[in-house]
Amino acid sequence: MEGLFARRIVGVETEYGITAVPADPNVKLTVDEIARYLFRPIVARYNSSNIFTLNGSRLYLDVGSHPEIATAECDSLTQVLNYDRAGDRMVDDLARSAEQALGADGIDAKVFLFKNNVDSVGNSYGCHENYLVGRHLPLRTLGKLLLPFMVTRQLICGAGMIGRATGTFQPGFLMSQRADQVWEGISSATTRSRPIINTRDEPHGDSERFRRMHVIVGDSNMSEPTFALKVGSTMLVLEMIEAGVSLPDFELDNPIAHIRDIARDITGSTLLTLKDGGTVTALEVQEATLAAAQAWVEERPDEGTPTEELRRVVDLWARQLDAIRTQDFSLVDREIDWVIKYTLLNRYRERLGEEWNNPKLAQIDLAFHDFRPGRGLFPLLQSKGLAQRWTTDEEIEAAILEPPTTTRAHLRGRFLRHAERLGAPVTADWVHLKVNAPEPQLIELNDPFAAVDKRVDGLLDYMDAHAGDYGDDA
């Protein structure tokens, strides 16, 4: 199966919403001011708001004053989940420091962090997925095969939200927060005209061997099982395409035409027009893709993500589609984000006797995405056993401290930790490691699968040899 990446490099980029509420209503803090407080310890330590952390991930302040974490390169499903959740906890630590710094400046304020994708006025920020694929498969060909799955994937892994009245749509529940924010199937844009799959060619590796498929249609997930289903199902579909598995022909006439309708139809019965003139429902696309994945998981090479774990993905996928078909959401009401939220909001809506545009429901919708322990609604549900886990706190804590041991991130983490211990001036990005003094030493790491490289050992030796040149901090 040449060209098949059963062991695949994958990563997730998460932008967080931030705000602060001062105890004194006369005190106003802009988002830019809050972001500066949030990143103050990072800037003080590294003289930059764009760094690579010791666990191999990238932490930076993105456009719009959104903190963002791009996970280290991972090569299995639970591994990328652990590093995604490690990112949440790292940003939470920054929020705690920001509250202390505000207090030291005489401002009593609470800092809030939200892992969602749309703010109160409709601005969108993303959760982008990155999947390594082979250069031999043209991205547009890959995209054509993937788009039917991607357009309908919100049925199984959307985060859910209360949508405002827009165009012909009335206020109501949406399964996906990003569905209203994308306008094309495949393009090189990211903000001007957001596509489902971005074609910008930045492989972060050997460009003759690798391509990075950048997916920007997905929601930020609070539920660990939903995250695992989102990424795991996509990995399985990519494997099947690479292996030449015959997938159902659902090439869409206009891939983007019905994404908003699908988001508002929890029955999955939205009709999609096929290029050959036929029609298929969103649920039927997912059911046919699941059937192929159920067969594939029994014959795939047991590499990267263990096949046993991918069977868990397929099981959850099947139960979610059964829930949609039967409308019996008790099958997944502790595992799927949008189902958990929909059930919760409906309970309050019935109690209030109100429509979807009630402000109290909007408060619950937002509180669901506040992931700070002791603050947010979802952490409370999880602590009460009303939201199931996929991983453990111990694994997440380990991911905060150390990079993955199985990918290039291991080399980056070793390099950065060694430099920090010696006080050596260094620079790092996804591909390059550089010791800046006394004489620049630069290497390029083009294989994201490689966790061992003698050249990195050479850089560590170089820093050791010149430790005396790095001043009092060495």
Image (cartoon, grey):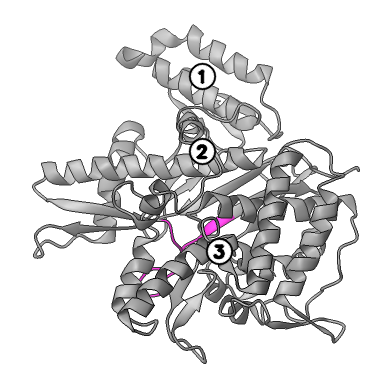
Report helix, strand or loop for mark 2. loop
Residue labelled with disc 2: 57
Label 3 vs 1, first from the N-terminus: 3
Residue labelled with disc 1: 439
Position in image of residue 26 (x %, y %): 8, 65
Position in image of residue 7 (x %, y %): 75, 38
Mark 3 in CB contact with mark 2 (< 8 angstroms): no
Q: CA distance from mark 2 to mark 1?
A: 26 Å
Q: Which residues are magenta?
A: 115-128
Position in image of residue 133 (x %, y %): 76, 48
Query: Looking at the image, is mark 2 or mark 1 nearer the viewer?
Result: 2
Relative to the observer, which residue lies in front, 122 or 376? Answer: 376
Q: CA distance from mark 3 to mark 1?
A: 63 Å
Please report the residue visible at 64 percent of the width from the left and 71 percent of the height from the top.
Answer: 324
Mark 3 in CB contact with mark 1 (< 8 angstroms): no
Q: Which mark is residue 330?
A: 3
User: For residue 98: magenta?
Assistant: no
Q: Answer yes or no: is residue 45 visible.
A: yes
Report helix, strand or loop for mark 1. loop
Q: Amino acid at mark 3?
A: Ser
Q: Quadrant of residue 118?
A: bottom left
Q: Answer yes or no: is residue 187 visible.
A: no
